[in-house]
Amino acid sequence: AVHEAARLNIPVVAIVDTNCNPDMVDHVIPANDDAIRAVLLISSKIADAVIEGQQMRGVMMAEDGEDYDETDVPPAVDLGADDYEDSDDDDSDIIIIDDEDEE
């Protein structure tokens, strides 16, 4: 995922432990990524910051007198119809494993 984000010029924010390589991470959060409590603490703080930022943006938009609609935001990457390959057999990539048949 990090390589794909770098290829698409998407900034990467990541929790980086001592056993990780931070070279491809744009915004490093130094923390223990193995401890559930640490991950929960950091993710809750990030979620709180996102909510606060959305509320501030809503206040700023209201002060401008403009209506904000989520559909006005362009997608991060515009994938046109040419980027998708349509196959006749949509189930060709699906592998079904049924353990009950083996009994």
Image (spheres, grey):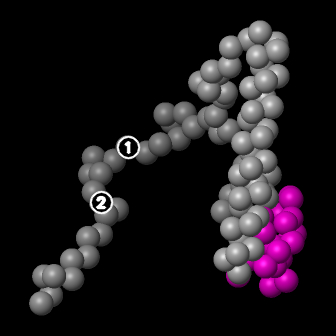
At numbered mark 2, what does the secondary structure look like: helix, strand or loop?
loop
> In this view of the protein, can residue 6 be seen by the observer?
no
- Left or right, 76 with respect to 87, comes to right
Up/down of 33 relative to 103, above or below: above
Which residue reaches farthest bottom?
Answer: 103
Q: Give the number of callouts.
A: 2
Give percent across and percent down for residue 92. Answer: 30, 60
The range drawn in magenta is 14-34
Task: Tell me: 37 left or right of 89.
Answer: right
Outermost residue, top direction? 65
Q: Depth check: give the residue in front, 33 or 84.
A: 33
Q: Amino acid at mark 1?
A: Asp
SS assignment at label 1: loop
Q: Residues within 10 Å of mark 2 (few under 14, many from 20)?
A: few
The one of 21 and 34 positioned closer to us in this rendering: 34
Q: Which mark is residue 86?
A: 1
Q: Looking at the picture, how far across and down is residue 26, in whole percent? A: 86, 58
Tell me what residue is drawn at x 31 percent, y 64 percent: 94
Question: Which residue is drawn at the image coordinates 85% and 83% (left, top)?
Answer: 18
Q: On the image, numbered disc 2 is attached to which residue?
A: 92
Q: Residue at x 53, y 41 (%)?
A: 83
Tell me where residue 35 sits by quadrant. Answer: bottom right
